[in-house]
Image (cartoon, helix red, strand yellow):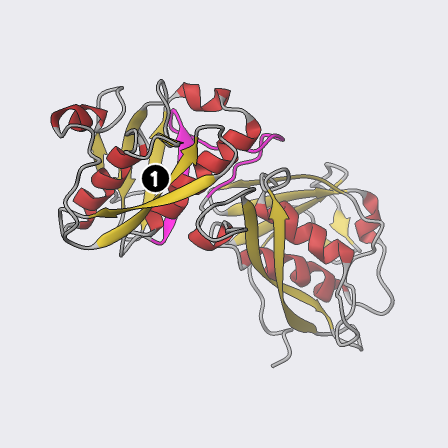
Protein backbone atom coordinates (compact mmCIF):
# COMPACT_ATOMS: atom_id res chain seq x y z
CA UNK A 1 0.00 0.00 0.00
CA UNK A 2 1.53 3.30 -1.04
CA UNK A 3 0.79 6.22 1.28
CA UNK A 4 2.67 8.68 -0.94
CA UNK A 5 5.44 9.46 1.53
CA UNK A 6 9.03 8.30 1.15
CA UNK A 7 10.76 6.97 4.19
CA UNK A 8 7.75 6.18 6.33
CA UNK A 9 7.98 3.01 8.33
CA UNK A 10 5.03 0.74 7.73
CA UNK A 11 3.47 -2.00 9.75
CA UNK A 12 1.08 -4.07 7.63
CA UNK A 13 -1.64 -6.25 9.11
CA UNK A 14 -3.87 -8.92 7.58
CA UNK A 15 -7.30 -7.68 6.62
CA UNK A 16 -8.56 -8.06 10.17
CA UNK A 17 -8.99 -5.41 12.77
CA UNK A 18 -5.45 -4.83 14.11
CA UNK A 19 -5.36 -6.23 17.38
CA UNK A 20 -8.77 -7.48 17.68
CA UNK A 21 -6.63 -10.62 17.55
CA UNK A 22 -4.63 -9.16 20.41
CA UNK A 23 -7.90 -8.45 22.16
CA UNK A 24 -8.70 -12.15 22.18
CA UNK A 25 -5.28 -12.99 23.56
CA UNK A 26 -5.48 -10.36 26.28
CA UNK A 27 -9.10 -10.97 27.28
CA UNK A 28 -10.46 -7.79 25.75
CA UNK A 29 -7.56 -5.35 26.15
CA UNK A 30 -9.66 -3.56 28.72
CA UNK A 31 -8.35 -4.93 31.98
CA UNK A 32 -5.02 -3.12 31.95
CA UNK A 33 -3.60 -2.48 35.39
CA UNK A 34 -3.55 1.15 36.37
CA UNK A 35 0.17 1.66 35.98
CA UNK A 36 2.33 3.35 33.41
CA UNK A 37 1.55 6.50 31.44
CA UNK A 38 -2.19 7.33 31.21
CA UNK A 39 -3.87 8.15 27.91
CA UNK A 40 -7.49 9.06 27.14
CA UNK A 41 -9.24 6.86 24.56
CA UNK A 42 -12.45 8.06 22.92
CA UNK A 43 -15.37 5.65 22.45
CA UNK A 44 -18.85 6.03 21.00
CA UNK A 45 -21.87 5.60 23.22
CA UNK A 46 -24.29 2.84 22.26
CA UNK A 47 -26.61 5.25 20.46
CA UNK A 48 -23.70 6.67 18.45
CA UNK A 49 -24.64 10.21 19.42
CA UNK A 50 -21.60 11.26 21.47
CA UNK A 51 -18.06 10.38 22.53
CA UNK A 52 -16.93 9.42 26.01
CA UNK A 53 -13.30 9.13 27.07
CA UNK A 54 -11.87 6.29 29.14
CA UNK A 55 -8.39 6.28 30.65
CA UNK A 56 -5.92 3.58 29.60
CA UNK A 57 -2.40 3.02 30.91
CA UNK A 58 0.29 2.35 28.34
CA UNK A 59 2.18 -0.89 28.72
CA UNK A 60 5.05 0.30 26.51
CA UNK A 61 7.32 3.34 26.28
CA UNK A 62 7.83 2.86 22.52
CA UNK A 63 5.72 5.16 20.33
CA UNK A 64 5.03 2.59 17.61
CA UNK A 65 3.93 0.05 20.20
CA UNK A 66 1.72 2.68 21.82
CA UNK A 67 0.06 3.34 18.45
CA UNK A 68 -0.75 -0.38 18.25
CA UNK A 69 -2.13 -0.25 21.80
CA UNK A 70 -4.42 2.66 20.94
CA UNK A 71 -5.62 1.10 17.69
CA UNK A 72 -6.24 -2.14 19.57
CA UNK A 73 -8.36 -0.34 22.14
CA UNK A 74 -10.32 1.52 19.48
CA UNK A 75 -11.49 -1.76 17.98
CA UNK A 76 -12.12 -3.36 21.37
CA UNK A 77 -15.34 -3.26 23.38
CA UNK A 78 -14.68 -1.24 26.57
CA UNK A 79 -15.65 -2.46 30.04
CA UNK A 80 -18.27 0.28 30.30
CA UNK A 81 -21.39 -1.38 28.90
CA UNK A 82 -22.82 2.00 27.89
CA UNK A 83 -20.08 2.34 25.30
CA UNK A 84 -19.12 0.50 22.14
CA UNK A 85 -15.95 0.00 20.17
CA UNK A 86 -14.95 3.05 18.14
CA UNK A 87 -14.16 0.85 15.14
CA UNK A 88 -17.17 -1.40 14.97
CA UNK A 89 -17.34 -4.94 13.62
CA UNK A 90 -16.52 -5.10 9.94
CA UNK A 91 -14.33 -1.98 9.81
CA UNK A 92 -10.86 -3.40 9.27
CA UNK A 93 -7.58 -1.63 9.84
CA UNK A 94 -5.58 -2.65 6.79
CA UNK A 95 -2.32 -0.79 7.47
CA UNK A 96 -0.88 2.02 9.47
CA UNK A 97 2.31 4.07 9.08
CA UNK A 98 4.19 6.40 11.40
CA UNK A 99 6.79 8.95 10.31
CA UNK A 100 7.80 10.56 13.58
CA UNK A 101 4.84 12.88 14.12
CA UNK A 102 2.10 11.72 11.74
CA UNK A 103 0.07 8.52 11.75
CA UNK A 104 -1.75 7.37 8.62
CA UNK A 105 -4.42 4.73 9.16
CA UNK A 106 -5.90 2.88 6.19
CA UNK A 107 -9.35 1.47 6.87
CA UNK A 108 -11.39 -1.05 4.91
CA UNK A 109 -14.23 -0.24 2.53
CA UNK A 110 -16.89 -0.75 5.23
CA UNK A 111 -15.91 2.61 6.70
CA UNK A 112 -17.64 4.35 3.79
CA UNK A 113 -20.96 2.83 4.89
CA UNK A 114 -21.04 4.66 8.24
CA UNK A 115 -23.87 7.20 8.67
CA UNK A 116 -22.61 10.78 8.45
CA UNK A 117 -22.81 11.63 12.15
CA UNK A 118 -21.28 8.28 13.16
CA UNK A 119 -18.44 8.80 10.68
CA UNK A 120 -17.62 12.23 12.10
CA UNK A 121 -17.67 10.87 15.66
CA UNK A 122 -15.51 7.92 14.65
CA UNK A 123 -13.04 10.21 12.89
CA UNK A 124 -12.89 12.51 15.91
CA UNK A 125 -12.30 9.54 18.22
CA UNK A 126 -9.45 8.23 16.07
CA UNK A 127 -7.73 11.60 15.79
CA UNK A 128 -8.12 12.55 19.43
CA UNK A 129 -7.03 9.16 20.75
CA UNK A 130 -3.96 8.87 18.51
CA UNK A 131 -2.79 12.43 19.07
CA UNK A 132 -2.88 11.80 22.83
CA UNK A 133 0.23 9.69 22.24
CA UNK A 134 3.35 11.81 22.91
CA UNK A 135 5.10 12.40 19.60
CA UNK A 136 1.97 12.09 17.44
CA UNK A 137 0.64 15.44 16.20
CA UNK A 138 -1.19 14.62 12.99
CA UNK A 139 -3.52 11.88 11.75
CA UNK A 140 -4.66 11.04 8.25
CA UNK A 141 -7.34 8.47 7.51
CA UNK A 142 -7.51 6.66 4.19
CA UNK A 143 -9.98 4.08 2.91
CA UNK A 144 -8.28 1.26 1.03
CA UNK A 145 -5.30 3.58 0.62
CA UNK A 146 -7.37 6.43 -0.86
CA UNK A 147 -7.76 9.75 0.96
CA UNK A 148 -10.83 10.09 3.14
CA UNK A 149 -13.21 12.47 1.40
CA UNK A 150 -16.12 14.69 2.33
CA UNK A 151 -19.61 14.55 0.86
CA UNK A 152 -18.43 16.55 -2.18
CA UNK A 153 -15.59 14.14 -2.88
CA UNK A 154 -12.83 16.49 -1.67
CA UNK A 155 -9.93 15.02 0.30
CA UNK A 156 -10.07 15.82 4.02
CA UNK A 157 -6.33 15.40 4.48
CA UNK A 158 -4.32 15.81 7.67
CA UNK A 159 -6.21 16.30 10.94
CA UNK A 160 -5.15 17.51 14.38
CA UNK A 161 -6.71 17.21 17.82
CA UNK A 162 -7.63 20.88 18.01
CA UNK A 163 -9.95 20.44 15.03
CA UNK A 164 -12.36 18.65 17.37
CA UNK A 165 -13.64 20.23 20.57
CA UNK A 166 -15.93 19.08 23.35
CA UNK A 167 -19.26 20.69 24.08
CA UNK A 168 -19.60 19.37 27.61
CA UNK A 169 -16.54 18.00 29.32
CA UNK A 170 -15.57 14.52 28.24
CA UNK A 171 -18.95 13.82 26.69
CA UNK A 172 -19.38 15.27 23.23
CA UNK A 173 -23.07 15.77 22.58
CA UNK A 174 -22.28 16.91 19.06
CA UNK A 175 -18.76 16.92 17.71
CA UNK A 176 -17.68 20.35 16.65
CA UNK A 177 -14.70 21.25 14.56
CA UNK A 178 -12.59 24.14 15.83
CA UNK A 179 -10.41 25.67 13.15
CA UNK A 180 -7.76 28.36 13.54
CA UNK A 181 -7.09 30.14 10.26
CA UNK A 182 -4.47 32.70 9.33
CA UNK A 183 -5.94 34.89 6.61
CA UNK A 184 -4.53 37.77 4.62
CA UNK A 185 -6.69 40.81 3.81
CA UNK A 186 -5.81 44.16 2.21
CA UNK A 187 -4.50 47.23 3.96
CA UNK A 188 -6.30 50.56 3.60
CA UNK A 189 -4.39 51.59 0.48
CA UNK A 190 -4.91 48.20 -1.18
CA UNK A 191 -1.24 47.64 -1.95
CA UNK A 192 -0.31 45.44 1.01
CA UNK A 193 -1.57 42.57 3.13
CA UNK A 194 -2.58 42.44 6.79
CA UNK A 195 -2.53 39.18 8.73
CA UNK A 196 -5.78 38.24 10.48
CA UNK A 197 -6.13 35.22 12.77
CA UNK A 198 -9.65 33.81 12.81
CA UNK A 199 -11.07 30.96 14.88
CA UNK A 200 -14.13 29.15 13.57
CA UNK A 201 -16.26 26.54 15.26
CA UNK A 202 -18.82 24.54 13.35
CA UNK A 203 -20.79 21.39 13.97
CA UNK A 204 -20.64 17.91 12.48
CA UNK A 205 -23.03 18.76 9.67
CA UNK A 206 -20.45 21.01 8.03
CA UNK A 207 -17.19 19.68 9.45
CA UNK A 208 -16.62 17.80 6.19
CA UNK A 209 -15.96 21.08 4.37
CA UNK A 210 -12.37 20.83 3.08
CA UNK A 211 -9.99 23.30 4.66
CA UNK A 212 -8.99 24.97 1.40
CA UNK A 213 -12.65 25.70 0.64
CA UNK A 214 -13.19 27.05 4.14
CA UNK A 215 -10.22 29.41 3.75
CA UNK A 216 -11.45 30.77 0.41
CA UNK A 217 -14.99 31.19 1.73
CA UNK A 218 -13.63 33.25 4.63
CA UNK A 219 -11.65 35.45 2.23
CA UNK A 220 -14.77 36.01 0.14
CA UNK A 221 -16.83 36.89 3.22
CA UNK A 222 -14.24 39.57 4.02
CA UNK A 223 -12.68 40.91 7.24
CA UNK A 224 -14.65 41.37 10.43
CA UNK A 225 -13.05 44.67 11.45
CA UNK A 226 -12.25 48.10 10.00
CA UNK A 227 -8.47 47.63 10.17
CA UNK A 228 -8.32 45.39 7.12
CA UNK A 229 -10.18 45.34 3.82
CA UNK A 230 -11.61 42.80 1.34
CA UNK A 231 -9.39 41.45 -1.43
CA UNK A 232 -12.11 39.55 -3.30
CA UNK A 233 -15.52 40.70 -4.49
CA UNK A 234 -18.19 39.31 -2.12
CA UNK A 235 -20.15 37.99 -5.10
CA UNK A 236 -17.31 35.68 -6.17
CA UNK A 237 -18.14 31.97 -6.40
CA UNK A 238 -15.67 29.16 -5.80
CA UNK A 239 -16.66 26.52 -8.33
CA UNK A 240 -14.21 23.80 -7.38
CA UNK A 241 -11.19 23.12 -5.18
CA UNK A 242 -8.83 20.15 -4.99
CA UNK A 243 -5.45 19.47 -3.44
CA UNK A 244 -2.93 17.11 -4.99
CA UNK A 245 0.76 16.66 -4.17
CA UNK A 246 0.82 19.90 -2.17
CA UNK A 247 -0.77 22.00 -4.93
CA UNK A 248 -4.21 23.53 -4.41
CA UNK A 249 -6.19 23.91 -7.63
CA UNK A 250 -8.98 26.49 -7.49
CA UNK A 251 -11.65 27.31 -10.05
CA UNK A 252 -13.58 30.56 -9.62
CA UNK A 253 -16.31 32.21 -11.62
CA UNK A 254 -15.41 35.33 -13.60
CA UNK A 255 -16.37 37.64 -10.71
CA UNK A 256 -12.90 37.11 -9.26
CA UNK A 257 -11.46 39.18 -12.12
CA UNK A 258 -13.34 42.26 -10.87
CA UNK A 259 -11.07 44.36 -8.66
CA UNK A 260 -12.33 45.43 -5.25
CA UNK A 261 -11.91 49.16 -4.63
CA UNK A 262 -8.23 50.01 -5.07
CA UNK A 263 -6.85 46.55 -4.28
CA UNK A 264 -3.97 45.60 -6.57
CA UNK A 265 -3.82 42.38 -8.55
CA UNK A 266 -0.87 41.17 -6.48
CA UNK A 267 -2.78 41.72 -3.23
CA UNK A 268 -5.78 39.77 -4.51
CA UNK A 269 -3.64 36.86 -5.73
CA UNK A 270 -1.42 36.62 -2.68
CA UNK A 271 -4.23 37.05 -0.19
CA UNK A 272 -5.51 33.75 -1.61
CA UNK A 273 -2.11 32.08 -2.00
CA UNK A 274 -0.65 33.11 1.35
CA UNK A 275 -3.82 32.15 3.23
CA UNK A 276 -3.93 28.69 1.63
CA UNK A 277 -0.23 27.98 2.09
CA UNK A 278 -0.78 28.41 5.84
CA UNK A 279 -2.47 24.98 5.66
CA UNK A 280 -0.05 22.14 6.35
CA UNK A 281 -0.92 20.19 3.18
CA UNK A 282 -0.59 23.08 0.71
CA UNK A 283 2.58 24.79 -0.55
CA UNK A 284 1.48 26.06 -3.99
CA UNK A 285 -1.72 27.36 -5.61
CA UNK A 286 -3.04 27.46 -9.18
CA UNK A 287 -6.10 29.53 -10.11
CA UNK A 288 -8.49 28.98 -13.01
CA UNK A 289 -11.41 31.16 -14.11
CA UNK A 290 -14.53 29.29 -15.26
CA UNK A 291 -12.30 26.28 -15.88
CA UNK A 292 -9.95 28.26 -18.15
CA UNK A 293 -6.21 27.93 -17.42
CA UNK A 294 -4.99 29.43 -20.70
CA UNK A 295 -5.77 33.13 -20.32
CA UNK A 296 -4.45 35.86 -18.06
CA UNK A 297 -5.64 37.14 -14.70
CA UNK A 298 -6.32 40.88 -15.06
CA UNK A 299 -3.81 40.97 -17.94
CA UNK A 300 -0.92 40.38 -15.54
CA UNK A 301 -0.54 36.73 -14.59
CA UNK A 302 -0.87 33.68 -16.81
CA UNK A 303 -3.55 31.39 -15.39
CA UNK A 304 -1.12 28.52 -15.85
CA UNK A 305 1.08 30.07 -13.13
CA UNK A 306 1.58 27.99 -10.01
CA UNK A 307 1.93 30.53 -7.20
CA UNK A 308 4.02 30.16 -4.06
CA UNK A 309 3.95 32.08 -0.80
CA UNK A 310 4.96 35.77 -1.08
CA UNK A 311 5.38 37.56 2.23
CA UNK A 312 6.92 40.71 0.74
CA UNK A 313 3.44 42.27 0.61
CA UNK A 314 2.67 41.56 4.27
CA UNK A 315 2.84 44.49 6.67
CA UNK A 316 4.84 43.80 9.79
Location of the N terminus by quadrant is top left
Q: Is residue 87 magenta?
A: no
Q: Nearer the viewer, residue 27 or 290?
A: 27
Q: Which residues are magenta?
A: 137-157
Q: Is residue 186 above or below residue 78?
A: below
Badge 1 is on which residue? 104
Please indicate, yes or no, whether residue 292 appears anywhere in the rendered image.
yes
Please indicate, yes or no, whether residue 305 appears anywhere in the rendered image.
no
* Drawn side of residue 174 relative to residue 100, left or right: right
Neighbour tally class for label 1: few under 14, some 14-19, many 20 plus, Cα within 10 Å: many
Residue found at x 71% / y 65%: 266
Q: Is residue 112 above or below residue 219?
A: above
Residue 293 on image: x %, y %? 69, 41
Residue found at x 32% / y 52%: 132
Residue 304 on image: x %, y %? 64, 46
Residue 281 on image: x %, y %? 47, 49
Residue furthest to the front in view is: 81
Q: Main secondary structure of the magenta part?
A: loop
Residue 76 on image: x %, y %? 28, 30
Q: Is residue 211 above or below residue 21?
A: below
Q: Nearer the viewer, residue 183 or 14?
A: 14
Amino acid sequence: MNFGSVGRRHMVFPVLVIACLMMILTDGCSKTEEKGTPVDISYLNKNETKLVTETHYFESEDTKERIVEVLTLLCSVPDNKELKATLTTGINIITYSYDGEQVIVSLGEKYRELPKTTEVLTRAALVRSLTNIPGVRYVMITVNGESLTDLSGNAIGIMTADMFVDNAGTQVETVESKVNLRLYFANESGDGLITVNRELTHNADVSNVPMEKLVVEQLISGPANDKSYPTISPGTKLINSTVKDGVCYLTFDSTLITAVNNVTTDVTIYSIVNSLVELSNINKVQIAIEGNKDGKFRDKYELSTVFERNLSLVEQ
